[in-house]
Amino acid sequence: MFPFKTCLNASTLFPFELTVKQQVRIAAEAGYEGIELWVKDLDHYFAAGGTVTELKRCFSETGIRFVNAIAFFAWTDEREEERQQGFIQAEKEMNRLAELGCAAVAAPPFGSVDGVSLESMAANFARLSELGAQIGIKPYLEFWGRAKKLSHLSEAMYVAMESGVPDAQILLDPFHMYTGGSDVENLAYINGERIGMVHVNDYPEMPLREVIADRDRVFPGEGKAPTQRMAQLLHISGYNGFLSLELFRENFGTRSALEVAKLGLDAIRNAYQVNNEANKEGEE
């Protein structure tokens, strides 16, 4: 059984240097239900004369949902001036995303966060969430395994809880769980309603965890990640949202963008199959 929705993060297609409309069409032709676009690609699209109306028409014609955007604004930077500029950038970008009908935006610990307490992060996330609510777009709290702060699932859970945001949601990623040392079993402590998005990928035995890089990510099921257990725990939690393929491969050999997208979709569906019997045992 596959109880989730499928999504393509545009990073997977970066080697092909596609426009955002091409990315959307590839995702649709491959069979995905949603897409995550990067703000930098949207900036290029609008700089080249693209319009909100044209892109919304592309979403409508293909049936693809714009479910989340990848942005980098310093919403919790320890430097006051940088943080204020981060909120100015966030407001501008979220307004544009809302115009496009995007549902959410990733909020990772971008910027200088070494000296920021988790309590301060919680307050900053509350401010960002309030701004998003006014605009009509939801920030997903994302942790990065290599970040100086907010690198672990438990930290993200703490920040979400302490923020006081009643519907705060976290963005999960097995690669960041691995590099930051988060145990997959800790997913048992999360209610599925608190998960906004799940990025999916896998990682090989080598390079070692201490030096592995984003470019080393592989398709779900091709590495050593506890993918089956993650699928079971997500399902038990009640999560039935999007699994979004996020790779950063530098090339895919002779494969075309469409072939890569289709291969990724098959990998998601195969790797994240849920065994009902195993779930029943886990609930007992």
Image (cartoon, helix red, strand yellow):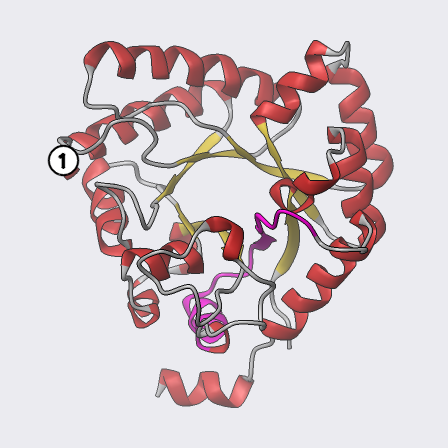
Residue 134 higher or lower than 17, as above or below: above
Residue 179 higher or lower than 80, as above or below: below
Q: x and y percent of residue 126 in the render?
A: 28, 29
Residue 6 higher or lower than 20, as above or below: below
In this picture, residue 24 sits left or right of residue 2: right
Magenta stretch: includes residue 247? yes
Residue drawn at 45 percent across, 87 percent down: 280
Give the quarter of the figure containing the N terminus.
bottom right
- Classify mark 1: helix, strand or loop: helix
Q: x and y percent of residue 143 in the render?
A: 34, 45
Magenta stretch: includes residue 79? no
Residue drawn at 58 percent across, 73 percent down: 221
Q: x and y percent of residue 51 in the render?
A: 76, 13
Residue drawn at 44 percent across, 51 percent down: 213
**Magenta segment range?**
229-251
Give the quarter of the figure containing the C terminus.
bottom left
Which of the 4 image quarters holds residue 59?
Answer: top right
Q: Nearer the viewer, residue 218 or 120?
A: 218
Residue 225 higher or lower than 257, as above or below: below
Residue drawn at 54 percent across, 16 percent down: 95
Identify which amino acid the numbered label 1 is placed on.
Glu
Q: Which residue does the numbered mark 1 point to in the structure image?
A: 119
